[in-house]
Image (cartoon, rainbow, N blue to C red):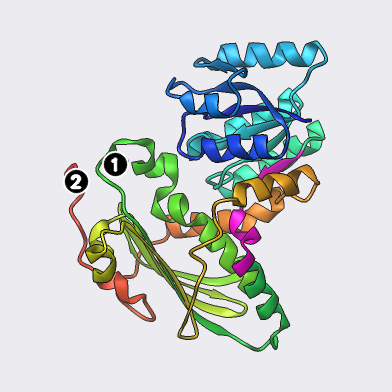
Amino acid sequence: MKRFALIGAAGYIAPRHLKAIKDTGNVLVAAYDKFDSVGIMDSYFPDAKFFTEQELFDRSCSKMVSEGNGIDYLSICTPNYLHDAHIRYGLRLGADVICEKPLVLNPWNVDALAKIESETGHRINNILQLRLHDTIVELKKKVDSESSDKVYDIDLTYITSRGNWYYASWKGDIHKSGGVATNIGVHFYDMLQWIFGEVTESVVHVSSFDRVAGFLRCKKARIRYFLSINSEHLPEEQKLAGKRTYRAIVIDGKELEFSEGFTELHTRSYEEILKGNGFALEDARACINIVYGIRNAEPVGLKGDYHPFAAYGLSRHPFGW
């Protein structure tokens, strides 16, 4: 049984980590979040210590370490811009780290963390759960078996509607979340480059507070993408059905069906990490480079090979910004 601590217990993604810790037969001994709406912990680890101040959480964890009851893993479910600092804390506490995506916001953060990994002898693991999805794994096997000259044409469309609360939260601040491409798209970019090879060209057609559209050229694919948090961009069929999310990957004119099989991917991620097969710092580097490039690119407008949804008229920010 491994001993876990967790930072970000009140966040949206935390319950998946709590479940994964429990499902893999381990124990949570301490958790921290500045918000105290963490009743979900009663369903998993009611005996875990909980703190709303970082200093008290650190004192408790450090005391455990000094008494010989150290922390084996620190799980990080905090806002994106805090990941780097919390990873550093976990490594220096003497724990291996399990961090939600995106691992960090900037490529140079990866280099700095590699040095701390080397200094401490502890490992960073990133949650890149789409690499464990059965349909995605089968697709990679198929692509790997094809001729090296084969190049696929792909359209990625991902619309996950968010209300006005989003723009008042850290997620609506590009400096904290990394923007739409980073916050909702990093795992898709990781999955695509993992399957189809290194990105050799990146063009951003449209980029705003609620959407991003562009083109990626990989070794084995030409990819048009459109990501949005605006419900107005949903296809009419989804709107009429009252749905708030639309996810589609079309490969050479055929849609890849992978809407199922997501519920247990965090538990599967933990199982692999505990066996020493987690996705490490270097595994995360490519997708961090991709989203950093998208975030800092100058949009070229509707030129060249752009996703059809990119032609939507730009929206007014809900707060008038």
Q: Secondary structure at mark 1?
A: helix
Q: Residue at x 68, y 55 (%)?
A: 283
User: Where residue 318 is drawn, which disc sits there?
Assistant: 2
Residue furthest front in the image: 43
166 inside magenta stretch = no
Q: Which residue is mark 1?
A: 167
C-beta proximity under 8 Å, tags 1 and 2 = yes
Magenta span covers which residues?
Answer: 123-135
Mark 1 or mark 2: which comes first in sequence? 1
Up/down of 89 relative to 15, above or below: above
For the residue carrying disc 2, how many other residues have a C-alpha within 10 Å: few (<14), some (14-19), or many (20+)? few
**Residue 142, image x, y percentages:** 67, 79
User: Where residue 231 is drawn, which disc sits there?
Assistant: none
> 203 or 312, which is in the foreground?
312
Up/down of 228 relative to 174, above or below: below
Of the residues shown, which amino acid type is indicated by label 1? Tyr
Q: CA distance from mark 1 to mark 2?
A: 8 Å
Q: Residue at x 36, y 75 (%)?
A: 307
> 141 or 295, which is in the foreground?
141
Q: Secondary structure at mark 2?
A: loop
Of the residues shown, which amino acid type is indicated by label 2? Pro
> Which of the 4 image quadrants contains residue 135?
bottom right
**Residue 216, image x, y percentages:** 50, 72
**Residue 176, image x, y percentages:** 43, 39
